[in-house]
Amino acid sequence: MWGGGGVWGGGRVVPPLVVASAIWYGALVSVGHFAGENAEVVVERASRGLLTVSAVLAIVLLAVWWRARRRAVGGDGAGAA
């Protein structure tokens, strides 16, 4: 039942798929070409972005750990009876 169970024939489904694929893969090739031509800039920006993401992740993990530790000790009254 390809193409909606016969409601749309294959001849009506294939052209939009071809156009969408051409746009998608054209964009991928363009991005790859740009990245290859500007490798130093891409690596520099990626490194800066990864450093930022790593710092934010470390802060979030530290906050989660600190909060879990406080609750386990009973520091916020959650565990008090």
Image (cartoon, rainbow, N blue to C red):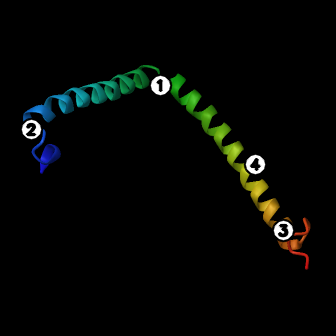
Earlier in the chain: of badge 4 and badge 1, it is: 1
Query: Quick one: 12 or 29, which is closer to the camera?
Result: 12
Specify whether 71 is left or right of 9.
right
Specify whether 4 is left or right of 39.
left
Q: Which residue is mark 1?
A: 39
Q: Which residue is mark 2?
A: 10
Query: Quick one: 10 or 58, which is closer to the camera?
Result: 10
For discs 3 and 4, the disc positioned in front in the rendered view = 3
Q: Is residue 37 above or below residue 76?
A: above
Is label 3 in a helix, a strand or a loop? helix
Earlier in the chain: of badge 4 and badge 2, it is: 2
Earlier in the chain: of badge 3 and badge 4, it is: 4
Determine the CA span between mark 3 and mark 4. Answer: 18 Å
For discs 4 and 1, the disc positioned in front in the rendered view = 4
Earlier in the chain: of badge 2 and badge 1, it is: 2
Is label 1 in a helix, a strand or a loop? helix
Determine the CA span between mark 3 and mark 1. Answer: 47 Å
Q: Which residue is mark 3?
A: 71
Q: Which image quarter: residue 62?
A: bottom right
Determine the CA span between mark 2 and mark 1. Answer: 42 Å
For discs 3 and 2, the disc positioned in front in the rendered view = 2
Q: Which residue is mark 4?
A: 59
